[in-house]
Image (cartoon, grey):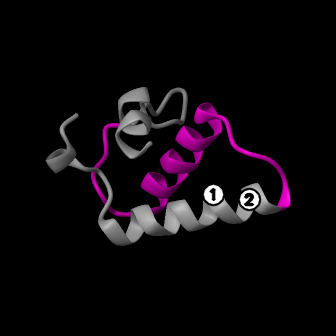
């Protein structure tokens, strides 16, 4: 996935980042698998088209690599 083929808008990516930061302050750092599951939930809640894995209910490793 190329950067210009992003799934989420900048606003949604910022929301995800803020959510992850809040979780890390209260609990622990998230694994990439947990982050990908959170991204899937955001994709599921939004009306945005995404190609995340619906069986595993998580975003792909390529999505995670793009944002890290």
Judged from this view, the residue extending furthest toward the bottom is 11
**Camera-side residue: 54 or 2?**
2
Quadrant (top left/top right/bottom left/bottom right) for the N terminus: top left
Q: Give the answer, above or below, for where 24 lies relative to 40.
A: below
> In the image, which residues are magenta?
26-51
Tell me if residue 63 is in the magenta stretch. no
For residue 23, which numbered disc appears in the image?
2
Tell me residue 63's x, y (percent): 37, 38
Quadrant (top left/top right/bottom left/bottom right) for the C terminus: top left
**Contact? badges 1 and 2 (CB < 8 Å):** yes
Which residue is tagged 1?
20
Tell me residue 51's x, y (percent): 31, 37
Tell me if residue 36 is in the magenta stretch. yes
Tell me residue 19's x, y (percent): 62, 64
Please identify the quarter of the rendering in which residue 24 is found: bottom right
Q: Residue at x 48, y 61 (%)?
A: 45
Q: Residue at x 41, y 66 (%)?
A: 12
In the drawing, does residue 1 fall left or right of residue 19? left
Please identify the quarter of the rendering in which residue 65 is found: top left
In the drawing, does residue 15 fall left or right of residue 60? right
**Camera-side residue: 24 or 40?**
24
- Assign a secondary structure to mark 2: helix
Circle count: 2
């Amino acid at each position: 996935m190329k950067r210009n083929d992003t799934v989420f808008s900048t606003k949604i990516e910022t929301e995800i980042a803020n959510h992850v930061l809040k979780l890390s302050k209260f609990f622990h750092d998230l694994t990439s698998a947990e982050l990908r599951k959170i991204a899937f939930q955001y994709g599921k809640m939004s009306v945005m088209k995404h190609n995340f894995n619906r069986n595993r209910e998580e975003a792909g490793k390529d999505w995670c690599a793009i944002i890290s």
